[in-house]
Amino acid sequence: MSSPSGNGVETAVRLLHKQLPAEMVVTGEAVAQAVRPWNAQVRRRPAVIARCRSTDDVRAAVLAAQSAGLPLCVLGGGHDWAGGAVRDGGLLVDLSAMRQVAVEGTEGVEGMAARVAGGATVTDVLDAVRPHGYAAAVGTVSSVGFTGLTLGGGYGTLIGLVGLGVDNVLAAEVVLADGRVVTADPHSEPELFWGLRGGGGNFGVVTEVRTRLNPHAEVTTGMIAFGWDQARAVLRGWRDLMASADDALDVMFGALYTPAGLVLFTSPTWAGDPARAEEQIARVRALGDPVLEDVGHRALADTVHAMDELFPRGGNYHLASRLLPGLTDAAIDDFVRAGDEMPATCGLNVHHSHGAATRVAADATAYQYRDEHLVVEILGSWTDGDGDGDSDSDGTTESAWVRDTEHRMDAHALPGGWPNLMARDDPRVADAYGRNTERLLAVKAHYDPDGMFMAMPVPR
């Protein structure tokens, strides 16, 4: 672990104490207890933590880090499996107390929006907008930070109707490296606004996002699972089904161990006319002979908790992803082979980008993947041991399976990939932004010329 100079840390602490109450500045041995990322494998430790409660607090922390010459890092939901939110020996801007969500607009009238503070989670957002009969473009895990998820792309079950998370961002408040606080939207700081939507927090600390809301607070959703021996047939059927499906039907799928054994699960979500829900769910059910089924009309706010118990905070994780342009027979075969070899604590989860998300130009935001595609999440997990090889369950088997599955899916994958699930040294980062790369680097050079912010992997 690298160590900053003592003078730098002392300078930062002194400057922070001038602006923040003492209890909001964490130093020394208390730092280890205060930093609790989702992935227990992240062992980096900052030298000092600023527990911010407002944009002014964030500004004070940024200026303190600049003056002291300390690396800066920002913690929101903490779900970045590779630990990009934590830098050894740096000053950590902790946004976890900034979780306010304010709903704007007139209910029942188009144009409803929410102002979401930088530390709010998916649950915070959905719980706040649910009483108004609305939802936001969110993912599938409740404790993920809304801002990081959204600005990194933002895949979710409403993608066919409302697009990616970045497509629903209306504005963002950002604290820049020089301490300026700016609002980025289509008319003010438009290049920053473009870069944030896909480039995430690589340009400053995003203290607030204004996002569009949609009238899909309740959907018909759940799980329909099939025995693994049916996997190939079900996936071929899924491909045929989705080729003609309504935008309102999203069907995630994957591999998961359950009490019924290894299954090919589908997670259908129908967000269209409730009168057509059974007809749509029946089409998914007909893909095979289900061994498990739990589907109903539910609040979207409740459904995002389904994956929480499978991959809880504090577990040990090794994650990867690959983006596939489609589900060919060869890709299906390799997916099934990966499931055949999958350890019992691991999983495969596949998002489908379709509908509204594909009707946005590839250069409209920094996030380039706009043709229909699949995101294969490869989830390595183990509960015992610390990953250092000193126990019977140190993650060696699980991590090896993740790497093997990555290599297996490479034959079918698009260049680059989803930066939210990339380690900083992943060579695919060079292709992750495609033709948007040059413009993205220009935005970075303008707003963060000294490279103070490293929220997500970016090409160099």
Image (tube, rainbow, N blue to C red):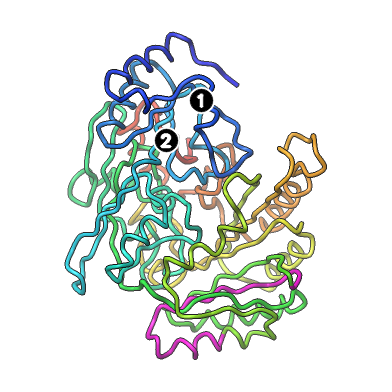
**Disc assigned to residue 30:** 1
| Dot 1 or dot 2, earlier in sequence | 1
Residues packed near mark 1 inside 10 Å, few (<14), some (14 to 19) or many (20 plus): few
Q: Residue at x 40, y 17 (%)?
A: 69
Front residue of 250/371: it is 250
Q: CA distance from mark 1 to mark 2?
A: 18 Å
Q: Which residue is mark 2?
A: 74
- Give the structural element (helix, strand or loop) at label 2: strand
Residue 99 in percent (x, y) is at 34, 47
Residue 129 in percent (x, y) is at 31, 63
Which of labels 1 and 2 is toward the front?
A: 1
> On the picture, is 271 further left or further right than 113?
right
| Placement of the N terminus among the 4 image quadrants | top right
Residue 125 in percent (x, y) is at 36, 57
Cβ–Cβ below 8 Å for labels 1 and 2? no
The amino acid marked with disc number 2 is Val
> On the picture, is 106 further left or further right than 37?
left
Residue 72 in percent (x, y) is at 42, 27
> On the picture, is 177 further left or further right than 302?
left
Q: Magenta span covers which residues?
A: 260-283
**Disc assigned to residue 4:** none
The amino acid marked with disc number 1 is Ala
